[in-house]
Image (cartoon, coloured by chain):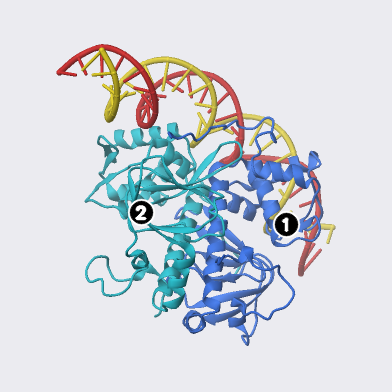
Chain colours: A blue, B cyan, C yellow, D red
Amino acid sequence: MFMYSQSTASPAGGATARPKLKDLFDGQRPEAFSPGEAIFWEGDEARQIFDVLEGVLRMCKVLPDGRRAIVGFIYPGEMLGLSFHDHYLFTAEAVIDVKVRRIPRVRFFALVNESPVVQPLLIAHLCDEMSAAQDQMLLLGRKSAEERVVSFLLAVHRKSAIDDHIVLPMSRLDMADYLGLTAETVSRTMTSLCRRGLIRTVRRGGVALRKRAALGEIADGAAEAAVSRRALVRRAVWPD
Amino acid sequence: MFMYSQSTASPAGGATARPKLKDLFDGQRPEAFSPGEAIFWEGDEARQIFDVLEGVLRMCKVLPDGRRAIVGFIYPGEMLGLSFHDHYLFTAEAVIDVKVRRIPRVRFFALVNESPVVQPLLIAHLCDEMSAAQDQMLLLGRKSAEERVVSFLLAVHRKSAIDDHIVLPMSRLDMADYLGLTAETVSRTMTSLCRRGLIRTVRRGGVALRKRAALGEIADGAAEAAVSRRALVRRAVWPD
DNA sequence: CGTCACTTTGAAAGCTTTCAATAGGAGTGG
DNA sequence: CCACTCCTATTGAAAGCTTTCAAAGTGACG
């Protein structure tokens, strides 16, 4: 069945015969950004679209009084500044050293439009982003601090798996602003997971996931997983 | 400048000369759903795409232990089941009496593909959804209960404005599951807003927005708006 | 080796939730 | 037309999870 979804596409790696969205950036010179540097600011006129070659970026939105939310992290192979309007809706900053390629937005969409092959790719990309966004809404709206942190660890694992080790290049504060928590709560939760042998933290943001099954149950809020957790067993029952 | 964004398009109403995504549904027979009825379930094979003619729908995701999050409400003129994968990622239910038209997903995308005119419309639609999702992440991650409720009231106002009156067709529980709160907290917040003369509730979900300016400041977390609110004044300052 | 920023840890406070009970409204049946 | 029932909304009080405020610990860097 015809489907607009990258996640159902063939596994990564292997032959690159079929075109990819990233190909649109071919020939562009890579640019480097240092940790903390902004690639663009919320409110800037959205003239460019970026392809991330190396590093990790954060997408931030800020309230007038300074509260910050990170609406996503971007890893190599992903695109930035794509799915939005005439002005950027968030600030993009480098979490660690970053290399990106850019092309003008007009050119990007011109290329997309003249190629019936890549157009579905763009739509697929947007669909994947949308689905991640909805998962995040569930996380932010209904998960406990521990569930959020574990969900995050597993998500990072999915994005950048090296066996059962992951690297968290961002600060606790970044994680907190992404998970709707405070840095202290994230720190406490990580400590707790360590003490229980579920994870093991290494230096420089390294984390070893010890018990994937248990972590998975915590992340998805398995009814039996937690003991002293908010009991929110509320069934949504609707009339027949 | 060329832009993929509906929100920058010409004002609604007026001439319908240019094609619209909804046109793809022309000729389809409308179907009716009663309150609480599901149009499709999370996990169902995603075979259809829907155009909402009348009523309001909710998109729900549920955790294994029953906790529910509503990832969005859908109003007339919007589409449903669009931006997703081979299986629906949420359950769609009627909040009130609903009329929809449907077409097979395959057919929808075939039509989109053969028309270079509507393809940008689809992308624009996805971009708008994405931008709303990011606003919601900011709301869920960083706003107080009152800010969430007020943001919601103003968002409903934007979607379905009748002067300064709005109608909330959904229950307090629906609102709560959308805002990451409980029904009690939503109720208490509404009562508080009433007592302060910011809104006025009428029967059957009617709400009159009294002081739009004040409400706007509350929703956006204006630094001066609230008095006894969490003081989260944390500036995101990055090195130059 | 001192500085600076980030992380961790502790203790108290707070906002929202939970639990419980009282209204309120709509629809039904007598 | 009114009584009755059911479900939702509202309100109260106590509990809890996360936050806030503070301070100590850790690591990178010059």
Q: Chain of mark 2?
A: B
Horizontal side of A19 relative to B93 (left or right) equals: right
Judging by the rendered image, the residue that carries numbered circle 1 is A157
Q: Chain of mark 1?
A: A
Residue A119 place in picture, x, y as percent: 52, 76
Label 2: which secondary element: strand
Q: Dots 2 and 1: beta carbons under 8 Å?
A: no
Alpha-carbon neighbours of circle 2 within 10 Å: few (<14), some, or many (≥20)? many
Label 1: which secondary element: helix
Question: Where residue B182 is drawn, which disc sits there?
Answer: none
- Work out whether residue B49 or residue B79 is closer to the camera in this orientation and state it: B49
Looking at the rendered structure, the kind of residue marked 2 is Val
Residue at point 60%, 32% (across, down): A230
Quadrant of the image containing the C terminus of chain B: bottom right
Judging by the rendered image, the residue that carries numbered circle 2 is B100
For the image, the number of numbered tags is 2
Residue A16 place in picture, x, y as percent: 69, 79
Horizontal side of A114 relative to C24 (left or right) equals: right
- Work out whether residue B129 or residue A175 is closer to the camera in this orientation and state it: B129
